[in-house]
Image (tube, grey):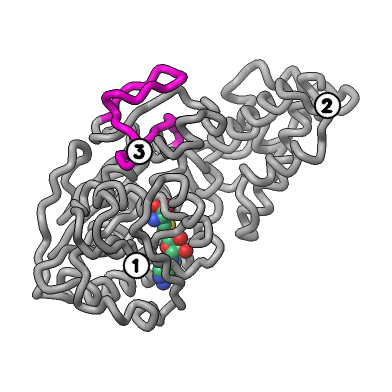
Amino acid sequence: MTPAARVQTAIELLDAIIAAAQAKGAPADRILADWFRGHRFAGSKDRRAIRELVYSAIRACGPVPATGRAAMLRLAELDESIAPLFDGSNYGPAAIGQSEQAARGGVAPEWLENRLAASDISGEEAAALLDRAPLDLRVNTLKADRATLDLPVDAEPTAVPNGLRIATGTSIEQWPEYREGKVEVQDTGSQAACLAIGARPGETVIDLCAGGGGKTLALAAAMDNLGRLVASDTDRGRLSRLTPRAERAGATNIEAVLLNPQQELEALEAHVGKADAVLIDAPCSGTGTWRRNPEARWRLDEKELQRLAATQSHLLDVAAKLVKPGGRIVYVTCSLLDEEGAGQFEAFLARNPGLKPREIDLPLGRERGAGTRLTPYHDGTDGFFIACAG
Ligand SMILES: C[S@@+](CC[C@H](N)C(=O)[O-])C[C@H]1O[C@@H](n2cnc3c(N)ncnc32)[C@H](O)[C@@H]1O
């Protein structure tokens, strides 16, 4: 493909990504993967270049761009190598018209920038939300030891006990160490969230929103497979990914439980008032993970944020029923908005005067309300709010 044809392809993909974001459809990564699968003539260099153009254009726009072409014109304002490729050549984009408008820059749609600023995320903190994410691994202590594990590439220890950082873009799926379950891909912030729960061998721990089990596997390792680890979620598809992952990781103490939304306690009845610890890795806006999926900024609206906050509050109340007296509840969101983090947790404590905030000792982050906040700018991790009560 010519460089101009790559730009035109990126424009068309951006059109699809913008439409999907507004319709809450497929994420950008899936749209790209599907296109690459259907267009085998695009070689690996083409694919890399197109991906880079698409993601750079997404990062360059704050509010939702009107079109893929407007998004690419915004990128052309930042990267002078792009405008000359609007050359009207075969398969390339038409020449830039005199009155054509580029999309607006910024960190996010204005309403969302304002919400972030109200949560003290602005300036460099806000800009860093759109950095490129590093590639972090967690060494699975059920099968390996960070101090002695030999990997095919250089790896730097991170601030968390079993974390390693390797070069972004490294493909690890074919590594024997990965296939044998010695390492998992997991952001350092997620690993810190797992540390906060302090899961110990022999305990009963409930991972209430387990999804595909990213944190469940870390908890199983912390428990050394001893005790009871309940992994629940309302999403059957996500939860079904846990079993093969647990097998690969050698995690043997996990019990997966599918929940009905709003009736979570029915399936978890046997555990009411008995859990030593409950982790709520709550569904959230994901403002802390824009480094990985920057078009998520265009999916969110105020109504969705309200819906998420209501679910978070409900799940905190569910956790309060599951935990035993003296047990601990750890609340985690990968959002930097206080209404999903410090504010949400404060309201929970106010509703439950019998529960008190507990200090969590993490090697990263800063105090925020009754919890700890990790940010890409300050900690080099995804953004997280993590808090504990008991
Ligand atoms: C942030 S994700 C969890 C990620 C997962 N813990 C991990 O580390 O890979 C939030 C999860 O909450 C689940 N969820 C949404 N509503 C729920 C509910 N009412 N009860 C339990 N889980 C729920 C979603 O299906 C989603 O998997």
Image-quadrant location for residue 365: top left
Look at the numbered disc 1 and give the secondary structure of its residue: helix
Residue 274: image x %, image y %? Answer: 20, 74
Question: How dense is the environment of label 3, judged by Cα within 10 Å: few (below 14), some, or many (20 and up)?
Answer: some
Q: Nearer the viewer, residue 385 or 172?
A: 172
Q: In the image, residue 222 lies at what x, y percent?
A: 25, 48
* Distance from the alpha carbon under mark 2 to that under mark 3: 51 Å
Kind of residue at badge 2: Gly
Whether residue 374 appears in magenta in the rendering, the answer is no
| Eye-nearest disc, 2 or 1 | 1
Q: Looking at this rendering, what residue extends furthest in the right direction?
A: 90
User: For the residue labelled by badge 3, is the local secondary structure a helix, a strand or a loop?
Assistant: loop
Label 2 residue SS: loop
Query: What stretch of residues is rendered in magenta?
Result: 130-158
Tell me the tag on residue 312: 1
**Residue 92 — which label?**
2
Please name the amino acid that badge 1 sits on. Gln
First in residue order: circle 3 vs circle 1: 3
**Label 3 belongs to which residue?**
143
Mark closest to the chain's N terminus, 2 or 1: 2
Nearest to the eye among marks 2 and 3: give it: 3
The dot on residue 107 is none
Q: Is residue 288 above or below residue 331?
A: above
Vertical order, 36 against 359 (above or below): above
Amino acid marked by disc 3: Lys
Place of residue 390 in the rendered image (x, y in percent of width and height, measured from the top left): 12, 65
Residue at the location (34% across, 77% down)?
268
